Amino acid sequence: MDPIRVGIVGASPDRGWAARAHVPALRALADFRITAVGTSRADSAQRARQLFGAEHAFTDPRELAEHPEVDLVAITVKVPAHAELIRAAVAAGKDVYCEWPLALNLSEAHALTRLAEDAGVRHVVGLQTRYAPAVARARQLLAEGFVGEPVSVTVYGARQLGAGTGVPGWAAYTLDRSTGAGVVEVFGGHALDLVQYLIGDVVDVSARLATPHRQAIIEDTGERIEVTSPNHLLLDAITARGIVVSAHIHDSKVSSGRTRIEISGTAGDLAIVSGANSRSGISLSELHLLGSRGDGDWEPVSGADSPADLSLGTDADNVARLYAALAQDVRTGTTAVPTFHDGVRVHRLLDTIASSADTGRRLSVP
């Protein structure tokens, strides 16, 4: 198969998720070639073209999507721009990979999914944490009955983004609820997607969203800003199989952040825990798998470590695994990667959580 030619929208040469994850991931895979890059300014687009080895540079994302040497458009910009860029890619008849969160809300995610489906293009959402070796091994062990019948899941996740203290300038936009990129949407979305990926859909929720720290100071400038995005998510939920789920996910931690997803069953327990880079959240952390059977102690589970032949760093490894799975889908005509439909599934859960918090009522997930 000829390499899949990728155009990256949001390929800043200075900093950003594309440079940290997508570019090294694509460069490591023979099935892909970066042929085009796009940024908002001509000078940065040209610098990105040279730095990342692309043939073409654009400031107009429509021109990038329409270029005949682009097969797949990768969208790596902030959430409010996702819808317009997805529409441009779909209108050009190109496959599209959009980072998570897929959209600003559930209705927008629904509309984008229908658009991509009607156009007959492949659509992928960046729920790449599913491809962490610890997660893949946990899913295998659950299917094999390691824990017996799952009874409960307990999630604790905290990012080191201050507790009413300073935040870096690049993170300021995540504190504005209108951007759709707060701790609930990003950290919560990735973590709760893993819960559903491992044990099945959540069908009923009672949730609380809290914003105890309503102001923050930008470290770079000293500017004081209002915080409108919730700092904390508290969740009490249940799955269709009757598995109880409890979660506390938050941003307000001044010491090092961490994540633990513990699955308890009738025969044993599994725990996915964060390691390196854990202060940044589950999707950016090196993950490990621990297991315990009967009265035994917690011990590392074999086969859950990152393969030695893929050492691109915490940010890029799982993105590379998702891209590799996409190439396999293209070759075989299958759809194993997370699609926009999976994005809608997570948005639906987050939407119900927000409604439960707003109304103070326990709600069924539609």
Image (cartoon, rainbow, N blue to C red):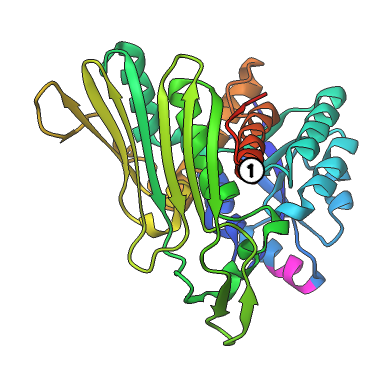
| Residue situated in front as seen by the camera: 256 or 127 | 256
Q: Name the residue located 53 percent from the left edge and 46 percent from the top edge.
A: 208
Query: Is the stretch drawn in magenta largely helix, strand or loop?
Result: helix
Q: Is residue 71 visible?
A: no
Q: Tell me where the magenta segment starts and ends, as one range.
A: 43-47
| Disc 1 target residue | 354
| Residue situated in front as seen by the camera: 280 or 107 | 107
Image quadrant in which you'd find residue 74: top right
Question: In the current view of this chain or complex, which residue is farthest to the front?
Answer: 360
For the N terminus, which image quadrant?
top right
Q: Name the residue located 83 percent from the left edge and 50 percent from the top edge.
A: 64
249 relative position to 270: left or right: right
Q: Is residue 27 magenta?
A: no
**Residue 286 position within the rendered picture, expressed as x and y whole percent measured from the top left:** 36, 48
The amino acid type found where label 1 is placed reads: Ala
51 relative position to 298: left or right: right
**Residue 328 position within the rendered picture, expressed as x and y whole percent measured from the top left:** 57, 24
Instruction: Count up the numbered dots.
Output: 1
Decide: is 23 above or below 296.
below
